[in-house]
Amino acid sequence: MNATILLITFFAYTALLFVIAWVTSRKADNQSFFTGNRKSNWFLVAYGMIGASLSGVSFMSVPGNVYNENFYYLPMLLGFIAGYAVIAFVLLPLYFKMNLTSIYTYLDKRFGNYSYKTGASFFILSRLLGATLRTFLVVFVLYNFVFKDMGIPFSIAAIIFVLIAIIYTMRGGVKTIVWTDTMQTTFMIVAIVAAVIFICNELNWSFGEMISSVFNDKHSDVFNTDWSSSRNWIKQFVSGAIVPIAMTGLDQAMMQKSLSCKNIRQSQKNIITSVAMMIPVNVLFLTLGAILAIYIGQNPHLLGAIGANAEGIVEADKIFPVVAFSLKGIVGIFFFVGLISAAYPTCANALTSLTTSSCIDILNMEKREWDEKTKKLIRMTVMFLLATLFILLILIFNDLKDDAVINMVYQIAAYTYGPLLGLFMFGIMTKMKTLDKAVPFICISVPVICFVIEKYIFSFGFSLILLCAALTFAGMFVFSTESTKTKTE
C-alpha cells in the first residue's frame, strides 16, 4: 500500500473530525467539557461507547490473538453481561443520586480525603498506562506503514497523533467526544465487515462456506479447560464479569459520557444498549481472527513479515495489518481508516477524563472561586501536561512491548483498577468506616502482593483483578473503625 495514499487518508479523516469538533464545540464552556451540560443523547453515547471500549487494541489485538489463543476471549465477553448489569443498576444510581462530576468524589464523602485522593490517583495512573498502551499500538502502525518510509521518526509520529487528539477535544470535551465517538464506531465496524468480505473473496468462500470453515477450524475452540492456564474459561468468564465494573463503571473516562445523559433512566439504557451491541461486534472481531489465521495458513510466506518473539510465538498485533496491506485493492485503506477510527477515541477520551479528574479531584476546581477564564487556562495547561506524559509513555512502550497489547492492557488493569474496585466494593457493600490514612498504604501494597502471587505461586490470568480487589477489601476491613451510616445516605 502506497504510504502517500495512507497519509492522505489520515489527514482527510482527521479533517472530518475537526469539522465535527468545530460544530459541537460552539458556545462550549467548562461544563460542556466536563459533563456535556447533561444533554447527551443516550443512544449516541451507547453506540459511541463501542468504539471507546474496543479501541485500536481490540481492532488489531483481538483478531490477531486468535492465531495464538483461539476463541478463548469469548467466555470473557459473556461475563460482560453481568458486569454491565452492575454498572447500570448499582453504580449509576449512586452517581446520579450524588450528582457527581467526578465519580471519585464518592470516596471523599464515604471515607475521607485520603481515600478520595488515592482513588483518583489510581484512576489517573490506570488511564495513563492503559490509554497510552492502546495509543502506542496505533502510532506503531502509523509509523511502520506511513511515516517510516518518509524518514519521519517514531517520536514525531507519536507527537502528531497526540496533538491532533488534543486539538479536536480541547474546547468541546465530552460534548464533542459523544459525536466523534459515534462517527468512529461506524467507521470501525465498516472496516471490519469490509475486511471479512475481501479476505473471504480471496479465499473464494461464500457466506455459508465462511461460517463452516470458521466453525470447523481449530482456532474457533472456545473453552480452555486447563485450570493452570491463565486463559482457562472459568477464569475468563469471572474476569469478564469483574473487568467492566472496574474498567468502565469505575473509570471516569467511560462514566463521564454516561453521566452526561439527561437522567438516570437514559444513562441506564445507554449502558444496557452498549453491551448488547458490544458483544456481537466482538464476535465479529473473533470471526475475522479465525479467517486471518486460515488465510495465513494458506499463505505461510506472510509469517516472515509478521515475525515472532524470542519464544517463537507469532506477533499477534502485526497479523491484521500485514494481511490487509498485502491484499490488492482498498482493503489496506479500510483497515487504516478502521484503525484510526478505533484509536482516536482512546486518546481523546483519556485526555478528557484525565483532565477532568486532575482538575476536579486533585486541584479541587469545583471548590475554588476561580473565574471561568482562569478555569479554562488551568484546564488547558493540565491537558497539555498530560499529553506530554502520553508521548513519553508511548516511547517507553515502544521499547518494552513483548506481548499482544490486549493482554498487556488487562495485566495493567488488574494491578491498577483492582484496588479501585476494592475501595468501591467496601463502600457500597458495607456501612463500616475505615482508617482513612491507611487507605493509600493498602492500595499501594496490594499490587505488590498480587504480583508476587501471580509470578511465583499461581496464575490468575485476567481474573487477577478480583484478587487485587479482594485484598484491598480485606485491608480496609482490618482497618475498619466502626459501623455507621455514611454521608451519602
Image (cartoon, rainbow, N blue to C red):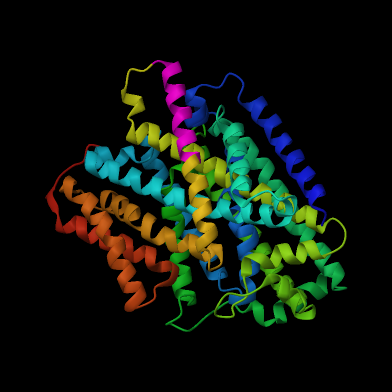
Q: Quadrant of the N terminus?
A: bottom right
Do we see residue 201 in this rendering?
yes
Instruction: Decide if residue 438 is on the left or right side of residue 290.
Output: left
Q: Residue at x 48, y 63 (%)?
A: 240
Q: Quadrant of the C terminus?
A: top left
Q: Position of residue 181 (x, y in %)?
A: 62, 42
Q: Magenta segment, which residues?
A: 371-387
Q: Is residue 182 magenta?
A: no
Q: Position of residue 133 (x, y in %)?
A: 52, 55
User: To which quarter of the image does residue 28 belong?
Assistant: top right
Instruction: Decide if residue 352 is on the left or right side of residue 5.
Output: left
Q: Residue at x 17, y 50 (%)?
A: 438
> For the view shown, which residue lies furthest in the left direction?
481
Q: 353 or 78, which is in the foreground? A: 353
Q: Is residue 375 magenta?
A: yes
User: To which quarter of the image does residue 314 belong?
Assistant: bottom right
**Magenta region, main secondary structure:** helix
